[in-house]
Image (spheres, helix red, strand yellow):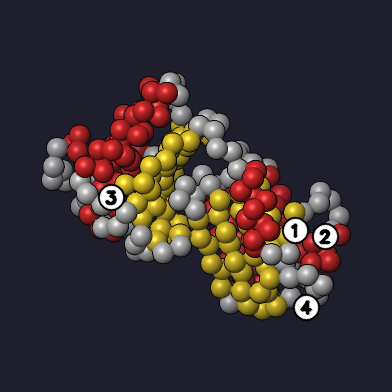
Amino acid sequence: MSVRVTADASTTVVEMSVHGRWSQQLGNQVADSLRRCLAGPCEAIVIDVSDIGDLHGVSLPYWSAAVREARLGPAPVQVALCCRPATMLDYRLRHQDGPPLTVFRTMTQARIAIAGGVSRADRLQARLAPRAASVRAARDLVIRACDGWRLAGTRDDAALIMSELATNAVDHAGTEFVVTVIRRGSRLHLAVRDGDSRYPLMGAADDGIRVPLGERGRGLRLVHAAAEVWGAIPADNGKVVWATMPAQA
């Protein structure tokens, strides 16, 4: 019994796969994972329920509630379900009362449909090598984005946050990484995807400056203080660490 969550490089598309016999405990895991996804910058969530043991489709209220919660949030998120055909859950998902649910037979179909509906506007992205110069390149990407979007009130804090996220990727992951900057409504989203599955830890003493401030920032404590919300989410062969803040003109 498990819930597995993975994200794309920018965390705008999240996939959730649910395994095991349906129970209240599994439902609670689903609800907790969904809340974590909706806290981040995701635009769409694909939930694979093909491997659930739910002979009579009793989990339907959970999926209806998940779709409703995502739609009614401050930044509406599209939710699609992938369900094994010719099952009672598939029938109930497709014929439930209320607004129709988006249901696909395979994850491939769901991915193609979701990808076509995700906005590519107001987005900058770069793939960088694991070297010190890439931290400056990541910060410059944020500055260029904020200048282009006229977000002077956000630029400095956003650049420092990105510097720390990129530094973590260089120092601790040591892999090629992808940085993404997205403006969505009244929020600016920053994300770094690297090839290390270990999550960053914010130590109590992580506030020293070992190199000039312009090069490094003040660690994850700075991210925690400057961002409205931040977190990490698994990705294929790695993770994405993200932060969200108000997009201030």
Tell me which numbered mark, 3 or 4, is placed earlier along the sequence.
4
Nearer to us of marks 4 and 1 is 1
C-alpha distance separating marks 3 and 1: 39 Å
In percent of the image, x 43 and y 21: which residue is there?
Answer: 150
Nearer to us of marks 2 and 4 is 2
Provide the residue designation for mark 2: 94
Quadrant in the picture for residue 56:
bottom right
Marks 1 and 2 in Cβ contact (< 8 Å): yes
Q: Which quarter of the rendered picture does the C terminus lie within?
A: top left
Tell me which numbered mark, 4 or 1, is placed earlier along the sequence.
4
Q: Residue 82's spot in the image, x, y percent?
A: 69, 63
Residue 129 is tagged as 3
Nearer to us of marks 3 and 4 is 3
Nearer to us of marks 3 and 1 is 3
Per the image, label 2 sits on a secondary structure element best described as helix
Front position in the image: 239 or 61: 239
Per the image, label 1 sits on a secondary structure element best described as strand
C-alpha distance separating marks 2 and 4: 16 Å
Nearer to us of marks 3 and 2 is 3
Provide the residue designation for mark 4: 55
Query: Would you call the spot at circle 3 few (<14 residues within 10 Å), some (14-19), or many (20 or more)?
Result: some
Residue 221 visible in this rendered orientation of the protein: no
Marks 3 and 2 in Cβ contact (< 8 Å): no
Marks 4 and 1 in Cβ contact (< 8 Å): no
Per the image, label 3 sits on a secondary structure element best described as loop
Residue 97 visible in this rendered orientation of the protein: yes
Q: Which quarter of the rendered picture does the N terminus lie within?
A: bottom right
- Please state which amino acid type lies under the numbered disc 2: Arg
Per the image, label 4 sits on a secondary structure element best described as loop
Q: Residue 129's spot in the image, x, y percent?
A: 28, 50
In percent of the image, x 54 and y 33: which residue is there?
Answer: 121
Using the image, determine if residue 156 lies above or below residue 7: above
